[in-house]
Amino acid sequence: MLSPLFKPVDFADCPGWQDDHHLPAFEAFRRSAKHVLEKPYKSGSLGISFDALAPVFADSRETLVKTDQEARRFFERWFLPVLVEDTGADGGFVTGFYEPEVVASPVRTERFTVPFLRRPLDLVDVDDGNRPHGLDPYFAFARQTAKGLSEYFDRPAIESGALAGQGLEIAFVESPVDAFFIHVQGAARLNMTDGRLRRITYAAKTGHRFTGIGRILLESGEVPPEKMSMQAIRAWLATHPEKAQALMWNNRSYIFFREAEVEEKSFGPIAAAKVPLTAGRSVAVDRLLHTFGTPFYIHAPDLKAFGGNRFARLMIAQDTGSAIVGSARGDLFAGSGDAAGEIAGGIRHRADFYALVPRSLLAQDR
């Protein structure tokens, strides 16, 4: 049954629907459709089930679509829009993320000292079947010890050497701040000093709750709300080097990485939905509520960072994140490199979310 947070509307009620370029969204949708042949997506709790999406995925794999108009007709044939209500105080809201690009060394040197680490052998997945008494239910990972499972080392402990000597290092960068923001983004392109291009992406994490250091700067009055952005946070860290580590250590969550192929430079990293992200068309959502592969039409009239007078385009749910919580909450993938970082860092906008629901589900719900 569909959630009461979904309010049926018509495509004509989605501002700018007719003017969007639907072909890139269709191509992103089809990448998810091909992946689910290997492993289906888990269904979100708001009622858009994978079973309902499966025939749409199947048709997209077989249908020849070459134009925006053909793509729009495909989505209109299979889906109907619903306005997604959000129970949070802020209503619908979008931020941005990107894939940083940084110079890195395959070995530790005098200049390159900050490592990216692989998943440790003693880090295990935790669920209701093996969760020890007293471990925070939020934790999806824990440390395997001789006495059983316990909370894993956090960021301060790991950066102080808790995992040193295990040979977990993938590569090294120069700046702790660059490394921190790559942890926040969950992926990066590494321009290696030996001339290679490498990519790292999320493998696991310690399990601790994510703490946004931007919110700390806001609450302490260090950065005013109207100036808050990723660039503002970086500027504060650069001008307060003596306080930078302490601030970053407030975020106890620590990410472990794995190496990934750079199959196509125009695409982003392979994210939680196991497909390469598409700049301006992939969105991270709350995966407990929504099902990967679901199309969302997002209207943010004050967002102009992607070009144009307003942001109004069809996106595909293909990633998630610890800070992405809520039914109308999204993180827009802006692409790779510094230019994408400039776009992503300035996105903090109210938005309306229109989920495209398979017509079969709406027929059942009536």
Image (tube, helix red, strand yellow):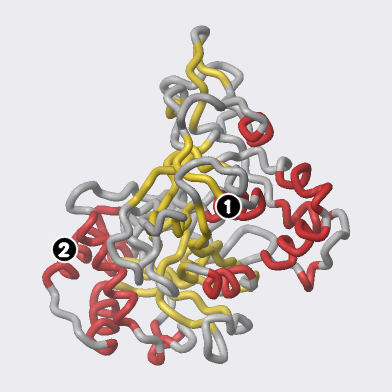
**Left or right of 31 in this view: 329:** right
The residue under the point 83% across, 67% down is 224
Give percent across and percent down for residue 287.
44, 51
Position of residue 93 measured from the top left corner of the image (x, y, whole percent): 60, 67
Q: Amino acid at mark 1?
A: Val
Indicate the quadrant containing the N terminus: top left, top right, bottom left or bottom right: bottom left
The residue located at (73%, 57%) in the rendering is 214
- x, y percent for residue 297: 44, 75
Q: Residue at x 40, y 72 (%)?
A: 281
Would residue 40 be found to the left or right of residue 183 on screen?
Answer: left
Contact between labelled residues 1 and 2, with CB atoms less than 8 Å apart: no
> Can you say which quadrant of the picture contains the C terminus?
bottom left
Helix or strand or loop: what does disc 2 sit on? helix
Depth order, front residue of 105/142: 105
Secondary structure under the numbered disc 1 in the rendered image: helix
Which mark is nearer the camera, 2 or 1? 1
User: In the rendering, at what x and y percent does residue 200 appear?
Assistant: 42, 50
Residue at label 1?
184
**Camera-nearest residue between 120 and 105:** 105
Q: Which residue is mark 2?
A: 58
| Callout 2 amino acid | Ala
